[in-house]
């Protein structure tokens, strides 16, 4: 129980110190609310929280799904085709180097204030690590495995499906775990720019009114969402690809 008890005790001690310092120095709530104020503010808006959570969660999952559908095949393509890699990969690196927060307003002007712009912002945030992880896993396939498959007469697709892709599964899930957490960030950035609901919108509207307690409550909910989604990806890996966990631990 130590891995569970110690972090809980550390968190409780941190909250206690935080609460004590705010009370001791009489810090105004609009500068730094105490944990008790954050909790009380959250209870006040508890009935509206599910609406904001669902709006953010929909953007997160939709953007993440689009990223997976595009990133994994593209990762396979650039890892197996040198021409495609030389033509596409530098452009992807350049696109990933551009801060999303800088081009988010441009995307909103181009696509409007609907869900489409938030999905594009989300996609740009979480696409790259999934694609790179996939390509890395494909290229990491041991040459001895490929030589053995060729010696048995296996074709390109057979080798890809039975050797390269299974070997890349641990890498792909590493990228998916990074991508799902980045997807939460992308959704919030999109809601900062254009949204009338969602946890990102709740943070912006609360800070505009100097209600930091409510904004911090929304941040806590976002952190919980990110942890739950990360664990969800890990559970999928354990359930569908349990052998990849052992392979991942061996690397």
Image (spheres, helix red, strand yellow):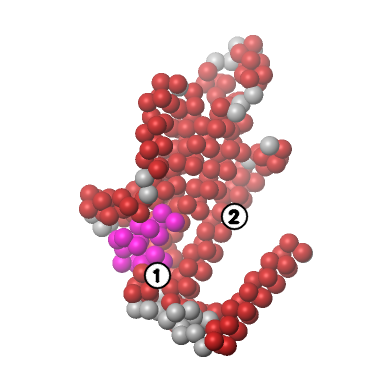
**Number of marks present in the image shown:** 2
In the rendering, at what x and y percent does residue 27 appear?
49, 85
In the rendering, at what x and y percent does residue 158 appear?
56, 21
Residue at (64%, 71%) from the top-left corner?
A: 11
Which quadrant of the figure contains the N terminus?
bottom right
In the rendered view, would you say 145 is above or below 5?
above
Q: State the residue lying farthest toward the front.
A: 25
In the rendering, at what x and y percent does residue 149 appear?
63, 17
Location of mark 2 (residue): 231
> Residue 139 sits in which quadrant?
top right
Q: Mark 1 or mark 2, which is nearer the start of the sequence?
A: 1
> Residue 30 sits in which quadrant?
bottom left
In the rendered view, would you say 90 is above or below 246?
above
Give the magenta part as a residue range.
185-201
In the rendered view, would you say 62 is above or below 134?
below
Residue at (40%, 42%) from the top-left corner?
A: 96
């Amino acid at each position: 129980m130590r891995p569970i008890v110690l972090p809980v005790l550390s968190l409780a001690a941190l909250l206690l110190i935080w609460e004590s310092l705010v009370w001791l120095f009489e810090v105004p709530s609009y500068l730094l609310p105490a944990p008790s104020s954050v909790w009380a503010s959250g209870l006040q808006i508890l009935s509206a929280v599910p609406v904001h959570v669902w709006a953010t969660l929909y953007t997160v999952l939709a953007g993440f799904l689009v990223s997976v559908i595009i990133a994994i095949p593209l990762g396979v393509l650039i890892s197996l085709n040198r021409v495609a890699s030389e033509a596409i990969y530098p452009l992807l690196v350049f696109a990933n180097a551009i801060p999303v927060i800088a081009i988010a307003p441009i995307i909103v002007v181009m696509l409007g204030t609907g869900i489409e712009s938030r999905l594009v912002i989300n996609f740009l945030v979480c696409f790259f690590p999934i694609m790179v992880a996939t390509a890395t896993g494909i290229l990491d396939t041991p040459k001895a495995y490929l030589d053995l498959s060729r010696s048995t007469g296996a074709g390109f697709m057979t080798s890809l499906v039975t050797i390269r892709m299974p070997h890349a599964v641990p890498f792909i899930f590493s990228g998916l775990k990074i991508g799902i957490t980045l997807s939460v960030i992308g959704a919030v950035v999109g809601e900062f720019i254009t949204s009338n609901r969602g946890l990102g919108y709740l943070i912006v509207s609360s800070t505009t009114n100097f209600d930091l307690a409510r904004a911090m409550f929304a941040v806590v909910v976002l952190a919980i969402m990110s942890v739950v989604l990360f664990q969800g990806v890990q559970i999928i890996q354990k359930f569908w690809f349990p052998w990849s966990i052992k392979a991942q631990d061996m690397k």
